[in-house]
Image (cartoon, rainbow, N blue to C red):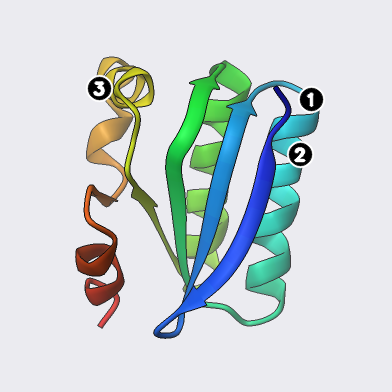
Amino acid sequence: MALTIASREVDGVTVLDLSGRITLGEGSVQLRDAVRDLIGKGQKHILLNLEQVNYIDSSGLGELVSAYTTARNQEATLKLLKLTKKVHDLLQLTKLYTVFDIYDDEAKAIGSYR
């Protein structure tokens, strides 16, 4: 199942609703392009909703880290929302859980940008 990305705006925060797999090739490229496009347009608050992401491979993990780094370098903030158990466990295992701001509640995540 390929990655699909839907973008929406909530209180000045751009929420990217991701669905599918973030893997080597198309999925990771789509994510990279979406985040870079938003930052290029001056969007400083980005929230990745991973509720519908059922699989991330090492390349996808690298892309999440790259998106986070790109955002920080451009003085933007990228946070994660609603991790599935698989993705949560993967971030714990790779110690990346401590790198990202991660939320289970969208309202709290949106509020954290203030």
The C terminus, quarter of image:
bottom left
Residue drawn at (45%, 84%), measured in percent from left and top? Answer: 12
Q: Which one is earlier in the sequence, the residue at label 3 or at label 1?
A: 1
Q: Is mark 2 on a helix, strand or loop?
A: helix
Spatial CA distance of label 2 from label 1 is 6 Å
Check disc 1 and give the amino acid type: Gly
Name the residue that disc number 1 marks.
25
Other residues around mark 3 within 10 Å, as few (<14) / some (14–19) / many (≥20): few
Spatial CA distance of label 3 from label 2 is 24 Å
Residue 35: image location, x then y, percent: 64, 58
Other residues around mark 1 within 10 Å, as few (<14) / some (14–19) / many (≥20): few
Check disc 3 and give the amino acid type: Gln
| Front in this rendered view, residue 58 or 75 | 58
Q: Which one is earlier in the sequence, the residue at label 3 or at label 2?
A: 2
Residue drawn at (68%, 35%), measured in percent from left and top? Answer: 3
Name the residue that disc number 2 marks.
29
Residue 2 is marked as: none
Image side of residue 74 versus residue 37, left or right? left
Name the residue that disc number 3 marks.
92
